[in-house]
Image (cartoon, helix red, strand yellow):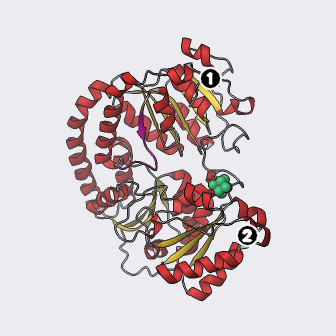
Amino acid sequence: MGSRNLPNQQSTAMTAERINPPILAERRAQVVEVVAGETTKLACERHSVAGAVSQRACVFCGSRVVLYPIADALHIVHGPVGCAVYTWDIRGSLSSGPELHRNSFSTDLRELDVVYGGEKKLRACLLELIAHYRPKAAFVYATCIVGIIGDDIGAVCRKVAEETGIPVLPVHSEGFKGTKKDGYRAACDALSRIIGTGDTGGILPHSINILGEFNLAGEAWIIRRYYERMGVQVVSTMTGDGRVDEIARAHGARLNVVQCSGSMTALAKRMEEEHGIPFRRVSYFGIEDMAKALYDVAEFFADAPAIMDRTRALVGEEVNALLPALEPLRRDLAGKKAAIYVGGAFKAFSLIKALRLLDMTVVLAGSQTGGPEDYERLREMCDPGTVLVDDANPVELSRFIVEKGVDLFVGGVKERPMAYKLGVAFCDHNHERKIALAGFAGMLNFAREVHLSVTSPVWRFAPRFEAMESGDRP
Ligand code: SF4
Protein backbone atom coordinates (compact mmCIF):
# COMPACT_ATOMS: atom_id res chain seq x y z
CA MET A 1 0.00 0.00 0.00
CA GLY A 2 1.37 3.46 -0.86
CA SER A 3 0.61 7.03 0.05
CA ARG A 4 0.95 10.58 -1.25
CA ASN A 5 1.13 14.01 0.29
CA LEU A 6 -2.13 15.86 0.19
CA PRO A 7 -2.13 18.88 -2.08
CA ASN A 8 -2.92 22.12 -0.32
CA GLN A 9 -6.27 22.68 -1.93
CA GLN A 10 -7.45 19.11 -2.38
CA SER A 11 -11.15 18.75 -1.82
CA THR A 12 -13.49 15.81 -2.06
CA ALA A 13 -16.73 17.25 -0.74
CA MET A 14 -18.86 20.29 -1.36
CA THR A 15 -18.57 21.33 2.26
CA ALA A 16 -14.83 21.03 2.15
CA GLU A 17 -14.63 23.25 -0.92
CA ARG A 18 -16.14 26.07 1.12
CA ILE A 19 -13.92 25.60 4.20
CA ASN A 20 -10.75 24.05 2.88
CA PRO A 21 -8.29 25.53 5.41
CA PRO A 22 -4.74 25.14 4.15
CA ILE A 23 -2.18 22.79 5.58
CA LEU A 24 0.79 24.94 6.58
CA ALA A 25 3.61 24.61 4.06
CA GLU A 26 6.05 23.44 6.79
CA ARG A 27 3.63 20.64 7.71
CA ARG A 28 2.72 19.22 4.35
CA ALA A 29 5.19 16.33 4.60
CA GLN A 30 3.46 15.30 7.85
CA VAL A 31 0.14 14.68 6.11
CA VAL A 32 -0.34 11.96 3.50
CA GLU A 33 -3.19 10.08 1.93
CA VAL A 34 -2.83 6.35 1.40
CA VAL A 35 -2.79 5.54 -2.31
CA ALA A 36 -2.39 2.07 -3.78
CA GLY A 37 1.01 1.76 -5.46
CA GLU A 38 2.50 5.01 -4.12
CA THR A 39 5.01 5.12 -1.28
CA THR A 40 5.40 8.68 -0.05
CA LYS A 41 6.66 8.49 3.52
CA LEU A 42 5.09 10.48 6.32
CA ALA A 43 7.57 12.89 7.93
CA CYS A 44 7.58 12.63 11.73
CA GLU A 45 9.61 13.09 14.94
CA ARG A 46 9.90 16.80 14.19
CA HIS A 47 9.47 19.69 16.57
CA SER A 48 6.01 21.18 16.29
CA VAL A 49 5.76 24.13 13.91
CA ALA A 50 5.49 27.41 15.82
CA GLY A 51 2.01 28.83 15.50
CA ALA A 52 0.51 25.57 14.23
CA VAL A 53 -1.33 25.02 17.57
CA SER A 54 -0.22 21.42 17.82
CA GLN A 55 -2.38 18.92 19.69
CA ARG A 56 0.81 17.69 21.36
CA ALA A 57 1.49 18.23 25.04
CA CYS A 58 4.81 19.69 26.24
CA VAL A 59 7.89 17.82 27.53
CA PHE A 60 6.85 18.35 31.15
CA CYS A 61 3.39 16.93 30.50
CA GLY A 62 4.98 13.90 28.83
CA SER A 63 6.96 13.16 32.02
CA ARG A 64 4.05 13.89 34.28
CA VAL A 65 1.65 11.46 32.59
CA VAL A 66 4.18 8.62 32.79
CA LEU A 67 5.18 9.08 36.44
CA TYR A 68 1.94 10.40 37.84
CA PRO A 69 0.25 7.02 38.60
CA ILE A 70 2.97 6.05 41.14
CA ALA A 71 0.58 6.39 44.01
CA ASP A 72 2.88 6.42 47.07
CA ALA A 73 5.30 9.01 45.69
CA LEU A 74 5.28 12.75 46.11
CA HIS A 75 5.05 14.59 42.79
CA ILE A 76 6.11 18.21 42.99
CA VAL A 77 6.06 20.56 40.03
CA HIS A 78 8.85 23.12 40.25
CA GLY A 79 7.43 26.05 38.34
CA PRO A 80 4.47 28.41 38.10
CA VAL A 81 1.24 27.09 39.53
CA GLY A 82 -0.28 26.93 36.05
CA CYS A 83 1.96 24.01 35.01
CA ALA A 84 0.76 22.05 38.05
CA VAL A 85 -2.89 22.90 37.46
CA TYR A 86 -2.61 21.91 33.80
CA THR A 87 -1.59 18.39 34.83
CA TRP A 88 -3.55 18.07 38.09
CA ASP A 89 -5.01 14.57 38.32
CA ILE A 90 -4.42 14.41 34.59
CA ARG A 91 -4.81 10.67 34.28
CA GLY A 92 -7.25 9.91 37.05
CA SER A 93 -5.20 6.73 37.43
CA LEU A 94 -6.82 4.46 39.96
CA SER A 95 -4.95 3.23 43.01
CA SER A 96 -5.73 0.20 45.15
CA GLY A 97 -4.09 1.93 48.13
CA PRO A 98 -2.52 5.35 48.70
CA GLU A 99 -3.63 8.32 46.63
CA LEU A 100 -0.84 10.81 47.23
CA HIS A 101 -0.37 11.03 43.46
CA ARG A 102 -3.73 12.72 42.99
CA ASN A 103 -2.42 15.94 44.54
CA SER A 104 -0.62 18.45 42.37
CA PHE A 105 2.03 20.09 44.53
CA SER A 106 3.79 23.11 43.10
CA THR A 107 6.54 25.47 44.22
CA ASP A 108 4.40 28.24 42.71
CA LEU A 109 7.35 30.20 41.31
CA ARG A 110 6.69 33.94 41.00
CA GLU A 111 8.52 37.02 39.76
CA LEU A 112 10.93 37.27 42.72
CA ASP A 113 11.79 33.58 42.43
CA VAL A 114 12.53 34.08 38.76
CA VAL A 115 14.89 36.94 39.64
CA TYR A 116 16.60 35.36 42.66
CA GLY A 117 16.22 31.66 41.84
CA GLY A 118 13.85 29.02 43.18
CA GLU A 119 16.22 26.47 44.73
CA LYS A 120 15.64 27.51 48.36
CA LYS A 121 11.91 27.44 47.85
CA LEU A 122 12.10 23.99 46.27
CA ARG A 123 14.17 22.63 49.17
CA ALA A 124 11.77 24.09 51.74
CA CYS A 125 8.74 22.64 49.91
CA LEU A 126 10.31 19.21 49.64
CA LEU A 127 11.28 19.07 53.32
CA GLU A 128 7.85 20.21 54.45
CA LEU A 129 5.92 17.83 52.19
CA ILE A 130 8.13 14.82 52.89
CA ALA A 131 7.84 15.40 56.63
CA HIS A 132 4.06 15.69 56.36
CA TYR A 133 3.20 12.92 53.86
CA ARG A 134 6.08 10.44 54.42
CA PRO A 135 6.19 9.37 50.75
CA LYS A 136 8.31 6.47 49.51
CA ALA A 137 10.02 8.74 46.96
CA ALA A 138 9.68 12.21 45.49
CA PHE A 139 9.74 13.30 41.86
CA VAL A 140 10.66 16.91 41.11
CA TYR A 141 9.54 18.10 37.68
CA ALA A 142 11.41 20.94 35.97
CA THR A 143 9.19 23.25 33.91
CA CYS A 144 10.04 25.84 31.27
CA ILE A 145 10.92 28.64 33.64
CA VAL A 146 13.29 26.42 35.62
CA GLY A 147 15.21 25.74 32.42
CA ILE A 148 15.37 29.47 31.75
CA ILE A 149 16.54 30.61 35.20
CA GLY A 150 18.86 27.61 35.58
CA ASP A 151 17.88 26.22 39.00
CA ASP A 152 20.03 23.16 39.75
CA ILE A 153 17.24 20.79 40.73
CA GLY A 154 19.64 17.84 40.65
CA ALA A 155 21.73 19.37 43.46
CA VAL A 156 18.64 20.20 45.54
CA CYS A 157 17.29 16.66 45.09
CA ARG A 158 20.62 15.11 46.14
CA LYS A 159 20.76 17.19 49.33
CA VAL A 160 17.14 16.53 50.27
CA ALA A 161 17.58 12.79 49.60
CA GLU A 162 20.53 12.76 52.03
CA GLU A 163 18.55 14.65 54.66
CA THR A 164 15.34 12.61 54.39
CA GLY A 165 16.64 9.16 53.42
CA ILE A 166 14.18 8.65 50.52
CA PRO A 167 14.90 8.79 46.78
CA VAL A 168 14.34 12.35 45.54
CA LEU A 169 14.49 12.29 41.78
CA PRO A 170 14.88 15.22 39.41
CA VAL A 171 12.83 14.94 36.23
CA HIS A 172 14.48 17.09 33.58
CA SER A 173 11.32 17.96 31.73
CA GLU A 174 11.63 21.65 30.89
CA GLY A 175 8.59 22.14 28.67
CA PHE A 176 10.28 23.84 25.74
CA LYS A 177 13.22 21.53 25.20
CA GLY A 178 11.72 19.05 22.76
CA THR A 179 8.59 17.03 22.17
CA LYS A 180 6.35 15.06 24.48
CA LYS A 181 8.58 12.08 23.68
CA ASP A 182 11.52 13.82 25.38
CA GLY A 183 9.31 14.02 28.45
CA TYR A 184 8.79 10.26 28.29
CA ARG A 185 12.58 9.82 28.20
CA ALA A 186 13.05 12.09 31.21
CA ALA A 187 10.47 10.02 33.11
CA CYS A 188 12.21 6.78 32.13
CA ASP A 189 15.53 8.23 33.36
CA ALA A 190 13.95 8.93 36.74
CA LEU A 191 12.41 5.43 36.92
CA SER A 192 15.68 3.76 36.02
CA ARG A 193 17.28 5.38 39.07
CA ILE A 194 14.82 3.54 41.32
CA ILE A 195 14.95 0.18 39.49
CA GLY A 196 17.67 -2.05 40.88
CA THR A 197 17.61 -0.63 44.38
CA GLY A 198 15.13 -3.13 45.88
CA ASP A 199 15.27 -6.69 47.17
CA THR A 200 14.33 -9.34 44.59
CA GLY A 201 13.54 -12.05 47.14
CA GLY A 202 10.33 -14.01 46.40
CA ILE A 203 10.33 -13.32 42.67
CA LEU A 204 9.41 -16.48 40.72
CA PRO A 205 11.06 -17.74 37.51
CA HIS A 206 7.92 -16.97 35.46
CA SER A 207 7.55 -13.29 36.23
CA ILE A 208 7.01 -10.09 34.31
CA ASN A 209 6.84 -6.33 34.67
CA ILE A 210 3.94 -4.59 32.95
CA LEU A 211 5.29 -1.40 31.37
CA GLY A 212 3.23 1.38 29.81
CA GLU A 213 -0.10 0.55 31.43
CA PHE A 214 -1.42 3.47 33.48
CA ASN A 215 -4.58 2.06 35.08
CA LEU A 216 -6.76 4.94 33.92
CA ALA A 217 -9.96 3.04 34.64
CA GLY A 218 -8.71 -0.17 36.23
CA GLU A 219 -7.10 -1.69 33.11
CA ALA A 220 -3.91 -2.63 34.95
CA TRP A 221 -6.00 -4.77 37.29
CA ILE A 222 -7.72 -6.54 34.38
CA ILE A 223 -4.40 -7.26 32.67
CA ARG A 224 -2.70 -8.36 35.88
CA ARG A 225 -5.53 -10.82 36.54
CA TYR A 226 -5.11 -12.34 33.05
CA TYR A 227 -1.40 -12.92 33.61
CA GLU A 228 -2.01 -14.31 37.07
CA ARG A 229 -4.64 -16.72 35.68
CA MET A 230 -1.93 -17.91 33.28
CA GLY A 231 0.37 -18.62 36.23
CA VAL A 232 2.70 -15.66 35.64
CA GLN A 233 3.79 -13.44 38.51
CA VAL A 234 3.54 -9.66 38.01
CA VAL A 235 6.40 -8.00 39.87
CA SER A 236 5.57 -4.39 39.08
CA THR A 237 3.29 -2.26 36.94
CA MET A 238 4.87 0.84 35.52
CA THR A 239 3.26 2.92 36.33
CA GLY A 240 -0.47 2.23 36.80
CA ASP A 241 -1.32 1.66 40.47
CA GLY A 242 2.48 1.81 40.86
CA ARG A 243 4.43 1.53 44.09
CA VAL A 244 8.00 2.66 44.62
CA ASP A 245 9.05 -0.59 46.36
CA GLU A 246 7.73 -2.73 43.50
CA ILE A 247 9.51 -0.60 40.92
CA ALA A 248 12.74 -0.83 42.95
CA ARG A 249 12.74 -4.63 42.59
CA ALA A 250 11.53 -4.75 38.99
CA HIS A 251 15.01 -5.84 37.86
CA GLY A 252 14.21 -9.28 39.33
CA ALA A 253 11.50 -10.04 36.72
CA ARG A 254 12.30 -12.30 33.74
CA LEU A 255 10.45 -10.31 31.05
CA ASN A 256 9.21 -6.79 30.41
CA VAL A 257 5.89 -6.52 28.59
CA VAL A 258 5.61 -3.06 27.06
CA GLN A 259 2.39 -1.35 26.10
CA CYS A 260 2.35 2.35 25.10
CA SER A 261 5.66 1.72 23.39
CA GLY A 262 6.27 5.43 22.81
CA SER A 263 6.58 6.11 26.50
CA MET A 264 8.24 2.98 27.82
CA THR A 265 10.34 1.34 25.12
CA ALA A 266 13.31 3.48 26.17
CA LEU A 267 13.08 2.10 29.69
CA ALA A 268 12.66 -1.47 28.43
CA LYS A 269 15.80 -1.13 26.29
CA ARG A 270 17.71 0.27 29.22
CA MET A 271 16.59 -2.58 31.48
CA GLU A 272 17.69 -5.03 28.80
CA GLU A 273 21.16 -3.45 28.71
CA GLU A 274 21.58 -2.95 32.43
CA HIS A 275 19.72 -5.93 33.89
CA GLY A 276 19.51 -8.41 30.97
CA ILE A 277 15.70 -8.41 30.88
CA PRO A 278 14.26 -8.89 27.36
CA PHE A 279 11.03 -7.18 26.37
CA ARG A 280 7.99 -7.70 24.14
CA ARG A 281 5.87 -4.91 22.68
CA VAL A 282 2.17 -5.58 23.08
CA SER A 283 -1.20 -3.91 23.04
CA TYR A 284 -4.16 -4.70 25.27
CA PHE A 285 -6.82 -3.13 23.04
CA GLY A 286 -9.06 -5.27 20.87
CA ILE A 287 -9.48 -9.04 20.80
CA GLU A 288 -6.64 -9.86 18.43
CA ASP A 289 -3.94 -7.81 20.15
CA MET A 290 -5.10 -8.72 23.65
CA ALA A 291 -4.86 -12.41 22.84
CA LYS A 292 -1.45 -11.90 21.22
CA ALA A 293 -0.19 -10.08 24.33
CA LEU A 294 -1.01 -13.15 26.41
CA TYR A 295 0.28 -15.69 23.90
CA ASP A 296 3.57 -13.77 23.52
CA VAL A 297 4.22 -14.10 27.23
CA ALA A 298 3.19 -17.77 27.25
CA GLU A 299 5.58 -18.45 24.37
CA PHE A 300 8.40 -16.70 26.21
CA PHE A 301 7.88 -19.10 29.11
CA ALA A 302 7.97 -22.15 26.85
CA ASP A 303 9.75 -24.09 29.60
CA ALA A 304 6.37 -24.17 31.40
CA PRO A 305 3.83 -25.68 28.93
CA ALA A 306 1.07 -25.38 31.53
CA ILE A 307 1.22 -21.61 31.08
CA MET A 308 0.37 -21.98 27.37
CA ASP A 309 -2.44 -24.42 28.20
CA ARG A 310 -3.95 -21.99 30.68
CA THR A 311 -3.55 -19.13 28.18
CA ARG A 312 -5.45 -21.02 25.47
CA ALA A 313 -8.23 -21.80 27.92
CA LEU A 314 -8.39 -18.18 29.10
CA VAL A 315 -8.52 -16.70 25.59
CA GLY A 316 -11.12 -19.24 24.44
CA GLU A 317 -13.34 -18.56 27.42
CA GLU A 318 -13.14 -14.77 27.07
CA VAL A 319 -13.60 -14.64 23.29
CA ASN A 320 -16.54 -17.06 23.35
CA ALA A 321 -18.29 -14.84 25.85
CA LEU A 322 -17.47 -11.64 24.00
CA LEU A 323 -18.34 -12.32 20.34
CA PRO A 324 -22.10 -12.86 20.76
CA ALA A 325 -22.33 -9.66 22.82
CA LEU A 326 -20.63 -7.68 20.03
CA GLU A 327 -22.92 -8.93 17.28
CA PRO A 328 -25.93 -6.57 17.70
CA LEU A 329 -23.62 -3.58 18.12
CA ARG A 330 -21.74 -4.50 14.99
CA ARG A 331 -24.92 -4.63 12.94
CA ASP A 332 -25.72 -0.99 13.78
CA LEU A 333 -22.15 0.22 13.26
CA ALA A 334 -21.42 -1.52 9.96
CA GLY A 335 -20.17 0.91 7.31
CA LYS A 336 -19.72 3.89 9.67
CA LYS A 337 -16.53 5.90 9.24
CA ALA A 338 -14.05 6.54 12.03
CA ALA A 339 -11.16 8.93 12.65
CA ILE A 340 -8.40 8.13 15.15
CA TYR A 341 -6.01 10.63 16.69
CA VAL A 342 -4.02 9.34 19.67
CA GLY A 343 -0.77 9.95 21.56
CA GLY A 344 1.25 6.94 20.41
CA ALA A 345 0.86 5.21 17.05
CA PHE A 346 0.93 1.72 18.57
CA LYS A 347 -2.52 2.31 20.04
CA ALA A 348 -3.77 3.33 16.60
CA PHE A 349 -2.90 -0.13 15.21
CA SER A 350 -5.10 -1.82 17.80
CA LEU A 351 -7.90 0.67 17.34
CA ILE A 352 -7.98 0.07 13.60
CA LYS A 353 -8.32 -3.66 14.21
CA ALA A 354 -10.96 -3.14 16.90
CA LEU A 355 -13.01 -0.80 14.68
CA ARG A 356 -12.77 -3.23 11.77
CA LEU A 357 -14.11 -5.95 14.04
CA LEU A 358 -17.16 -3.68 14.41
CA ASP A 359 -17.32 -3.43 10.60
CA MET A 360 -16.35 0.25 10.71
CA THR A 361 -13.95 1.92 8.27
CA VAL A 362 -11.03 4.06 9.43
CA VAL A 363 -10.61 7.08 7.15
CA LEU A 364 -8.19 9.17 9.25
CA ALA A 365 -5.42 7.98 11.56
CA GLY A 366 -2.75 9.99 13.31
CA SER A 367 -0.68 10.39 16.42
CA GLN A 368 1.29 12.94 18.41
CA THR A 369 4.50 10.95 18.72
CA GLY A 370 4.64 8.17 16.10
CA GLY A 371 8.01 7.21 14.58
CA PRO A 372 8.90 6.22 10.98
CA GLU A 373 8.37 2.49 11.58
CA ASP A 374 5.00 3.16 13.21
CA TYR A 375 3.76 5.20 10.26
CA GLU A 376 5.06 2.68 7.77
CA ARG A 377 3.03 -0.01 9.49
CA LEU A 378 0.03 2.30 9.70
CA ARG A 379 0.26 2.93 5.95
CA GLU A 380 0.36 -0.80 5.27
CA MET A 381 -2.69 -1.39 7.48
CA CYS A 382 -4.89 1.40 6.13
CA ASP A 383 -7.18 1.36 3.11
CA PRO A 384 -6.58 3.63 0.10
CA GLY A 385 -7.98 7.09 0.75
CA THR A 386 -7.15 7.05 4.47
CA VAL A 387 -5.46 10.26 5.61
CA LEU A 388 -2.43 9.82 7.91
CA VAL A 389 -1.30 12.76 10.04
CA ASP A 390 1.60 13.31 12.40
CA ASP A 391 1.47 15.99 15.11
CA ALA A 392 -1.79 17.43 13.77
CA ASN A 393 -3.66 20.56 14.84
CA PRO A 394 -7.38 21.29 15.20
CA VAL A 395 -7.72 22.95 11.80
CA GLU A 396 -6.28 19.97 9.96
CA LEU A 397 -8.22 17.40 11.97
CA SER A 398 -11.48 19.31 11.53
CA ARG A 399 -10.90 19.60 7.82
CA PHE A 400 -10.39 15.89 7.35
CA ILE A 401 -13.30 14.96 9.60
CA VAL A 402 -15.55 17.01 7.36
CA GLU A 403 -13.98 15.93 4.07
CA LYS A 404 -14.13 12.25 4.95
CA GLY A 405 -17.63 12.38 6.40
CA VAL A 406 -16.52 10.92 9.72
CA ASP A 407 -19.20 9.40 12.01
CA LEU A 408 -16.94 8.74 15.01
CA PHE A 409 -13.81 10.44 16.33
CA VAL A 410 -11.61 8.44 18.74
CA GLY A 411 -9.16 10.67 20.59
CA GLY A 412 -8.38 12.34 23.90
CA VAL A 413 -9.37 15.32 25.96
CA LYS A 414 -8.22 17.87 23.38
CA GLU A 415 -10.09 16.20 20.54
CA ARG A 416 -13.42 15.89 22.36
CA PRO A 417 -14.63 19.50 21.89
CA MET A 418 -13.61 19.39 18.25
CA ALA A 419 -15.84 16.37 17.62
CA TYR A 420 -18.80 17.76 19.54
CA LYS A 421 -18.63 21.13 17.80
CA LEU A 422 -18.71 19.34 14.46
CA GLY A 423 -21.64 17.18 15.56
CA VAL A 424 -19.62 13.98 15.42
CA ALA A 425 -19.76 11.07 17.89
CA PHE A 426 -16.71 10.77 20.15
CA CYS A 427 -14.97 8.06 22.15
CA ASP A 428 -12.35 9.10 24.72
CA HIS A 429 -9.46 6.68 24.50
CA ASN A 430 -7.14 8.67 26.70
CA HIS A 431 -6.71 10.22 30.14
CA GLU A 432 -10.27 11.16 30.98
CA ARG A 433 -12.10 7.94 30.48
CA LYS A 434 -13.75 6.23 33.43
CA ILE A 435 -14.54 2.90 31.78
CA ALA A 436 -11.83 0.32 31.14
CA LEU A 437 -11.22 -0.21 27.42
CA ALA A 438 -8.37 -2.73 27.66
CA GLY A 439 -8.69 -6.48 27.75
CA PHE A 440 -11.55 -8.60 26.45
CA ALA A 441 -13.98 -6.92 28.84
CA GLY A 442 -12.63 -3.57 27.62
CA MET A 443 -13.39 -4.45 24.00
CA LEU A 444 -17.04 -4.87 24.90
CA ASN A 445 -17.00 -1.58 26.81
CA PHE A 446 -15.39 0.10 23.80
CA ALA A 447 -17.99 -1.29 21.40
CA ARG A 448 -20.84 -0.24 23.70
CA GLU A 449 -19.44 3.28 24.06
CA VAL A 450 -18.91 3.66 20.32
CA HIS A 451 -22.41 2.35 19.66
CA LEU A 452 -23.99 4.65 22.25
CA SER A 453 -22.25 7.71 20.86
CA VAL A 454 -22.72 6.97 17.14
CA THR A 455 -26.41 6.09 17.50
CA SER A 456 -27.23 8.83 20.00
CA PRO A 457 -30.27 10.94 19.06
CA VAL A 458 -28.41 14.02 20.27
CA TRP A 459 -26.79 14.45 16.87
CA ARG A 460 -30.16 15.43 15.44
CA PHE A 461 -29.85 18.60 17.51
CA ALA A 462 -26.21 19.28 16.62
CA PRO A 463 -26.20 19.32 12.84
CA ARG A 464 -23.04 17.84 11.50
CA PHE A 465 -20.17 20.09 10.42
CA GLU A 466 -22.19 23.27 10.93
CA ALA A 467 -19.37 24.85 12.96
CA MET A 468 -16.96 24.55 10.04
CA GLU A 469 -19.45 25.84 7.51
CA SER A 470 -20.20 28.92 9.59
CA GLY A 471 -16.50 29.66 9.98
CA ASP A 472 -16.64 29.06 13.76
CA ARG A 473 -13.87 26.48 13.67
CA PRO A 474 -13.23 24.21 16.64
S1 SF4 B 1 6.32 23.35 31.31
FE1 SF4 B 1 6.21 25.09 29.90
S2 SF4 B 1 4.99 24.39 28.15
FE2 SF4 B 1 4.67 22.93 29.85
S3 SF4 B 1 2.82 23.66 30.93
FE3 SF4 B 1 4.59 24.60 31.97
S4 SF4 B 1 4.90 26.59 30.92
FE4 SF4 B 1 3.56 25.34 29.60
The vertical placement of 166 against 339, above or below, is: below
* Residue at the disc numbered 2: 113
Which amino acid does the dot numbered 2 rest on? Asp
Determine whether the residue tagged by mark 1 lies in a helix, strand or loop.
loop
Quarter placement of the C terminus: top right
Residue 1 showing in the rendered view: no
Q: Residue at x 58, y 55 (%)?
A: 62
Disc 2 crowd rating (10 Å Cα; few below 14, some 14-19, many 20+) is: some
Q: Residue at x 61, y 14 (%)?
A: 18
Disc 1 crowd rating (10 Å Cα; few below 14, some 14-19, many 20+) is: few
Quarter placement of the N terminus: top right
Mark found first going from the N terminus, 2 or 1? 1
Percent coordinates x, y for residue 13 in the rendering: 54, 13
Which amino acid does the dot numbered 1 rest on? Glu
The vertical placement of 112 against 289, above or below, is: below
Percent coordinates x, y for residue 340 in the rendering: 48, 35
Q: Quadrant of ligand 1?
A: bottom right
Which region shows up in magenta?
Answer: 426-434
- Classified by dominant secondary structure, the portion drawn in magenta counts as loop
| Mark number, residue 38 | 1
Most foreground residue, 46 or 49: 49
Determine whether the residue tagged by mark 2 lies in a helix, strand or loop.
helix
Question: Disc 2, disc 1: CB below 8 Å?
Answer: no
